[in-house]
Image (cartoon, rainbow, N blue to C red):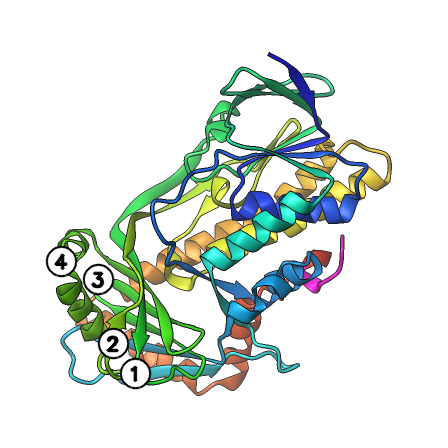
Amino acid sequence: MGMLRSDIVISGGSYAGLTLALALAKTLGPEIAITVIDRQVVPTGRDVRAFAISAGPRHMLDVLGIWPKVRDEAQEVLEIQLTDSPLEAGVRPVLLTYDNTLENGEPASFIVPNEALATALENAADAEPAIQILRPAEATGFTEGDPFLRVHLADGRSIETSLLVAADGRRSRLREAAGIKCIGWSYDQIGIVTQVAHELPHNGRAIQHFLPGGPFAILPLRGNRSCITWSEDAVRAREILAYDDEAFLAEVDKRFAGRYGRLTLAGPRASWPLEMHLARRYVGHGFALVGDTAHGVHPIAGQGLNLAFRDIAALTECVAEAVRVGLTPGDSSALERYEQWRRFDSGLSAATFDALNRLFSNDMTLVRSAREAGLALVDRIPALKRIFVSEAAGLSGELPRLLRGELA
């Protein structure tokens, strides 16, 4: 079979892989050839998931030309409410409410349907001259060389490249081929997602109910609709998922606690087991990990894709700076800088979300009382709320240029 050649190869044609390809193409120009290896997994049904896109990543999507394509379907989040009570509680008092806007009036986050973002990314990548997409194709491994790597495809072909980026998900074959181990564990929880239509407007409000089985998030969509992202005890989740639509909706309605009036299902349900993992290394010789391949976090804060976008912005900047001074895209110093930039942040995020899930899924009376006191205290400190909003917006720390809305 033939040998192909590309300056940069990205394994994985989903959100992280396509966004990285576009970021590199826009930054480096048409002289750098980029190949995306896409397995082209055929969807089995409508994707009801939705992403919370923070302000920093939104700036990047804007400069890449993606945000204008999804803006009409994006719902701004203007307010966030947190509650903490047993499922059977007749009243769910709001313990913490905060305005989800930045000092310049910009919303700190938007909720974007997955299907809208996927379509926009695929169309933009297909139209970009510097990007070649091999689909269906799959990278099965690679061989190190000097100065190039050789990427092996399942159909027998190979690609010679200076930089190979694994964006092929939590069960990455390339991460395994590189000998990079992960630390992590599974939660005794299952994530459930669906969409509902409701009688009353949400007014741009996102709600997080902390329940003993796990957090139940109500994310506003355009119109009188919301996306439900629900973490539930694994045994109970399997029971709920086996219900017919009427009984399933009754479980959703119970967790809404009367908010937004009458509910109807507005899409199918989806589910997956929840886990956390963190790669011990993010880079190797001419090799880098991004997104879920590098880190998988609990969905309690809805930050999984935002962490991937931060990876993409940092890696793009490191690679661009190397290329501009005459080095190859896979230069070791550039990749080492990327790892230093991203590994601590993503590791801290994974640990924080893990701790929050364990804390708020604990139904002991003493622990619940302490949580309620803590949330009530935060609710009375506006400056602390602003810090939380800025952090969640992805605008704190050392920001890559793309997260500031500038090409790297």
Mark pair 2, 3: CA separation: 22 Å
Location of residue 290 in the rendering, given as x and y in whole percent from the top left corner:
56, 42
Question: Is 94 placed left or right of 252 in the picture?
Answer: right
Say which of marks 1 and 3 sits in front: 1
The amino acid on which the numbered mark 4 sits, given as a three-letter code, is Tyr
How many residues crowd around disc 3 within 10 Å: few (fewer than 14), some, or many (20 or more)? many
Q: Nearer the viewer, residue 402 or 212?
A: 402
The earlier-in-sequence mark between 2 and 4 is 4
Q: Quadrant of residue 28?
A: top right
Residue annotated with mark 4: 243
The amino acid on which the numbered mark 2 sits, given as a three-letter code, is Leu
Residue annotated with mark 1: 199
Q: Nearer the viewer, residue 364 or 166?
A: 166
- State whether the magenta stretch is mostly helix, strand or loop: loop
How many residues crowd around disc 1 within 10 Å: few (fewer than 14), some, or many (20 or more)? few
Residue annotated with mark 2: 263
Q: Using the image, determine if residue 251 lies above or below residue 374.
A: above
Location of residue 60 in the rendering, given as x and y in whole percent from the top left corner:
66, 59
Q: Using the image, determine if residue 68 lies above or below residue 3.
A: below
Give the magenta range.
403-408
Q: Quadrant of residue 404?
A: bottom right
Mark pair 1, 2: CA separation: 7 Å
Q: Nearer the viewer, residue 298 or 26?
A: 26
Residue annotated with mark 3: 213
